[in-house]
Image (cartoon, rainbow, N blue to C red):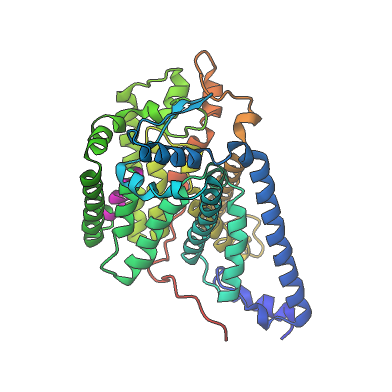
């Protein structure tokens, strides 16, 4: 079959389908593979350069804090007494629940160099899983193409600040996201009795993943909900039995002190609370205004989750839930927003699936599009705009671009405050505008096809 015939034949297929590379003529196959490999290498080179420029100065700061806090704890000090002096955020210490401390307690058994290497490999591995599970919900490809797409998308993901900063700081964000994704898209899909354990463990390690209980309630995943709550409760209780005093201190005092994790109006805090702090120039934004904003986000997000669940679009439902958690948390650093990865997959897949081709061409003898095509075209342009702006604000260092301070927005203009909150604004827009796949109920994700 000639190459042109193969390409023509794809027009009758759904836009997410793909021709097997092995079915192409030898010369065309060589060109396609060569371009793909060059693209993969270019993506990794770009990712490495971004990490070198913006990641190295952070020097795995958060991981070093975890390491030193555990060493201090083993030395007989209180778990939450360790404090690292930071020139921007003041004193930084261990801020996670006691169960997370039990998991991290073996860190001082190895040198910090080994811990950094192991953590780096873990972040790369969990990013691969996050990308793979996201792509599997939107791209129905044969295994060779799927693996190539996963490699390209993973390299591209490290161009996004949430992922590159997770690596630069030595953070746990991708690991927590993978616990949720595996729970929903692997264990949940198989009807496993362990479905819910991942979300429960994520909740016990860090409280923010508790937002996924909202998804389980709206989706009527009652068994998963019970397992998640029971797992989180069991892990938290186990930690309380081991370190009762530290557990009491954390849940009665430290949990409610947002200032322990940094300055609230820090430009890197891309939550509603951080936005309010920058707009008002106050380090203690009005709690009533913040609560109203949280309720609005929860209401809008819940409606979107309900519609996505009704359409069978689980990926969008989970993505919206993750973004919602980032927005309503009192402090959400940019590296917390790893849910931008599945959000980009959702946006790209929708653009490819509805690419303006014959559907948007005027009928013969007519120079105007019919109303349905005009609506489709507007939606496609809006989706392209959402994707383009998202890539811009999460790849570019907007603080340097706009000449913004790290902290202290008092006396600055509303324009500076909004520019410093540009990632929050995008996530609010994505909460409303990310498209729901309306045909998911009839086209469920299929297992990857093996080689023939």
Please tell me which residue lies in front, 246 or 344. Answer: 246
| Residue 220 x, y percent position in the rendering | 24, 58
- Quadrant in which the N terminus appears: bottom right
The residue located at (55%, 63%) in the rendering is 353
Q: Does 202 appear in magenta?
A: no
The residue located at (48%, 66%) in the rendering is 136
> Residue 184's image quarter?
bottom left
Question: In the image, is 441 to the left or to the right of 248?
Answer: right
Q: Residue furthest right?
A: 27
Please tell me which residue lies in front, 61 or 29. Answer: 61
Magenta span dominant secondary structure: helix
| Residue 387 x, y percent position in the rendering | 57, 48
Which region of the structure is painted magenta? 208-216
Identify whether 131 is placed above or below 389.
below
| Residue 45 x, y percent position in the rendering | 70, 53
Please tell me which residue lies in front, 201 or 9. Answer: 201
- Quadrant in which the C terminus appears: bottom right
> Residue 397's image quarter?
top right
Question: In the image, is 223 to the left or to the right of 345?
Answer: left
| Residue 346 x, y percent position in the rendering | 50, 56
Q: Residue furthest top?
A: 411
The residue located at (52%, 67%) in the rendering is 139
> Residue 51's image quarter?
top right
Please tell me which residue lies in front, 379 or 129. Answer: 129
Identify whether 273 is placed above or below 174.
above
Identify whether 360 is placed above or below 146.
above
């Amino acid at each position: 079959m000639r190459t042109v015939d193969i390409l023509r034949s794809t027009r009758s297929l759904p836009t997410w389908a793909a021709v097997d590379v092995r079915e192409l003529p030898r010369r065309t196959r060589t060109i396609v593979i060569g371009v793909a490999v060059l693209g993969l290498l270019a993506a990794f080179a770009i990712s490495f350069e971004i990490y070198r420029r913006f990641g190295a100065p952070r020097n795995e700061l958060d991981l070093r804090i975890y390491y030193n806090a555990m060493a201090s704890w083993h030395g007989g000090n209180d778990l939450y007494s360790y404090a690292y002096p930071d020139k921007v955020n003041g004193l930084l210490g261990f801020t996670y629940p006691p169960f997370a401390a039990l998991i991290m307690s073996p860190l001082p058994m190895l040198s910090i160099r080994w811990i950094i290497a192991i953590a780096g490999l873990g972040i790369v591995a969990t990013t691969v899983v996050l990308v793979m599970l996201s792509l599997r919900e939107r791209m129905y490809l044969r295994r060779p193409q799927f693996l190539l797409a996963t490699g390209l998308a993973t390299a591209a993901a490290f161009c996004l600040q949430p992922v590159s900063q997770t690596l630069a700081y030595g953070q746990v964000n991708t690991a927590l996201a993978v616990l949720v994704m595996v729970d929903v898209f692997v264990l949940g899909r198989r009807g496993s009795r362990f479905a819910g354990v991942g979300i429960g463990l994520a909740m016990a390690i860090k409280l923010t993943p508790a937002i996924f209980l909202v998804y389980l309630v709206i989706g009527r995943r009652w068994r998963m909900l019970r397992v998640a709550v029971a797992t989180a409760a069991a892990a938290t209780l186990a930690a309380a039995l081991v370190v009762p005093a530290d557990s009491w201190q954390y849940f009665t005092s430290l949990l409610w002190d947002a200032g322990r994790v940094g300055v609230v109006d820090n430009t890197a805090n891309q939550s509603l609370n951080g936005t309010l702090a920058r707009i008002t120039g106050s380090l203690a934004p009005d709690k009533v205004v913040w609560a109203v904003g949280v309720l609005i986000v929860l209401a809008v997000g819940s409606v979107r989750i309900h519609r996505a669940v009704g359409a069978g679009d689980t990926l969008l439902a989970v993505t919206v839930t993750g973004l919602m958690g980032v927005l309503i948390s009192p402090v959400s650093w940019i590296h917390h927003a790893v849910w931008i990865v599945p959000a980009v997959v959702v946006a790209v897949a929708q653009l490819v699936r509805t690419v303006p081709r014959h559907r948007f061409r005027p009928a013969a003898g007519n120079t105007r599009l019919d109303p349905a095509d005009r609506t489709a075209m507007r939606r496609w342009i809006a989706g392209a705009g959402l994707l383009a702006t998202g890539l811009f604000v999460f790849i570019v260092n907007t603080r340097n671009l706009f000449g913004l301070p790290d902290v202290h927005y008092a006396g600055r203009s509303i324009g500076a405050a909004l520019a410093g909150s540009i990632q929050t604004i995008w996530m609010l827009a994505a909460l409303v505008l990310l498209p729901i796949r309306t045909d998911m109920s009839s086209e469920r994700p299929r297992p990857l096809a093996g080689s023939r």
